[in-house]
Image: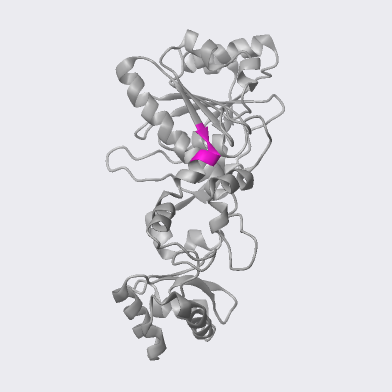
């Protein structure tokens, strides 16, 4: 085992989306994560979020299997579950039962709506959780419905990432107090928290225009994506005056109309004019002219292209595991680098108990 979390034991009750991703983050950083799955589920290297951990198949509806899971939880430092509120209690694996066996365990609960509140028992998905947070309303183009940002914002940013922050914070406290606690990570809570910067701007009057017409949501001509002559796209983020000036110098925007950088009323016109400029060359030609400069420019790459980009390749940002090209662990550590991810593997109850004596 290697990485800053080497020696940490985590039991994960397999679910969907953010809970497995949170467990993956911990495993990437060296934690020993044991994944409890349904009997019919086989480890699959194509499911990147299950990498670097052993899977133990248990039918938790059976008393013997539930007792075995409890015995393993009693030897763990962290627990992750992503079921609706009350499911783990019905399985005999709720926090009260687990803490009776292992008082210092940190019990992580990942849901969309949280453990309480009027919506706690309702079904939902990322799009619903970020909708009530206020975040979804800010994403999209003018005059059209909001655009769901895949499931980055709720499931993985506001959900899994903040669950991991909560787990490690509670673990730090437990190392002093000797007492674990429940971490209630709700995607609707986390997505709202991720909006803090924009909410602050709104309070200052800096985010006051309709969706898609503000500085950082594609409204500004100098912070947007553009189509090139070959149908591919580039991203421009030249906010600061000196970077905007560099962009103008390199692509030949000499027309004085572009002097009005921060005049939001002119942004639609300037965006149209800049779009016409970018359509005159291919993405590769724009990269040759702008990439690596202070014009704040990058090509928009898909998941097939990203691994081969020179910067990503130089930093090893992508790797292959189990025949699947996938993102490498992050962030970087100078003294305790994470191990290389491995495909998930199956284990037996006997081996799991032996490993966690």
- Residue 303 locus on image (x, y percent): 55, 58
Residue 112 visible in this rendered orientation of the protein: yes
Q: Is residue 186 magenta?
A: yes
Rendered view: 157 above or below 97: below
Please tell me in which quadrant of the rendered image residue 248 appears: bottom left
Quadrant holding the C terminus = top left
Q: Is residue 66 left or right of residue 105?
A: right
Rendered view: 272 above or below 198: below
Q: Image point 49% across, 41% down: which residue?
A: 190
- Residue 261 locus on image (x, y percent): 38, 78
**Main secondary structure found in the magenta portion:** helix
Q: Image point 44% across, 67% down: which residue?
A: 215
Please tell me in which quadrant of the rendered image residue 123 appears: top right
Q: Is residue 313 left or right of residue 66?
A: left
Rendered view: 136 above or below 174: below
Q: Which residues are magenta?
A: 185-189
Rendered view: 158 above or below 117: below
- By what rule are the colours in the image chosen? one colour
Quadrant holding the N terminus = top left
Residue 52 visible in this rendered orientation of the protein: no
Please tell me in which quadrant of the rendered image residue 207 appears: bottom left
Q: Nearer the viewer, residue 171 or 134?
A: 134
Q: Nearer the viewer, residue 196 or 126?
A: 196
- Residue 312 locus on image (x, y percent): 42, 59
- Residue 168 locus on image (x, y percent): 39, 30
């Amino acid at each position: 085992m290697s990485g800053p979390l080497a020696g940490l034991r985590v039991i994960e009750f397999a679910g969907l989306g953010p809970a497995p991703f949170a467990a993956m983050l911990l495993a990437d950083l060296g934690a020993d994560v044991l994944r409890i799955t349904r009997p019919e589920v086989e480890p699959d290297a194509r499911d990147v979020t299950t990498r670097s951990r052993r899977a133990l198949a248990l039918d938790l509806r059976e008393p013997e299997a539930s007792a075995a899971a409890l015995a393993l939880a009693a030897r763990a430092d962290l627990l992750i579950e992503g079921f609706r509120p009350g499911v783990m209690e019905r399985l005999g694996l709720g926090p009260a039962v687990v803490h009776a066996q292992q008082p210092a365990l940190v019990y992580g609960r990942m849901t969309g709506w949280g453990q309480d509140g009027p919506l706690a028992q309702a079904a939902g998905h990322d799009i619903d959780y970020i909708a009530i947070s206020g975040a979804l309303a800010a994403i999209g183009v003018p005059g059209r419905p909001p655009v769901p940002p895949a499931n980055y914002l709720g499931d993985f940013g506001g959900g899994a990432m903040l669950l991991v922050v909560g787990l490690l914070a509670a673990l730090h406290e437990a190392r002093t107090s000797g007492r674990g606690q429940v971490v209630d990570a709700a995607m609707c809570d986390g997505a709202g928290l991720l909006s803090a910067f924009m909410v602050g701007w709104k309070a200052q009057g800096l985010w006051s225009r309709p969706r898609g017409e503000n500085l950082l949501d594609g409204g500004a001509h100098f912070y947007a994506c553009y189509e090139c002559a070959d149908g591919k796209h580039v991203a421009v983020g030249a906010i600061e005056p000196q970077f905007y000036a560099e962009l103008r110098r390199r692509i030949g925007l000499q027309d004085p109309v572009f002097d009005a950088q921060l005049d939001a009323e002119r942004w639609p016109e300037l965006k149209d004019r800049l779009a016409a400029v970018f359509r005159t060359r291919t993405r590769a030609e724009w990269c040759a002219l702008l990439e690596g400069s202070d014009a704040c420019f990058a090509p928009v790459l898909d998941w097939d292209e990203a691994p081969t980009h020179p910067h990503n390749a130089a930093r090893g940002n992508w790797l292959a595991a189990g025949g699947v090209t996938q993102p490498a662990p992050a962030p970087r550590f100078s003294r305790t680098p994470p191990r290389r991810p491995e495909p998930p593997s199956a284990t037996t109850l006997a081996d799991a108990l032996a490993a966690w004596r």
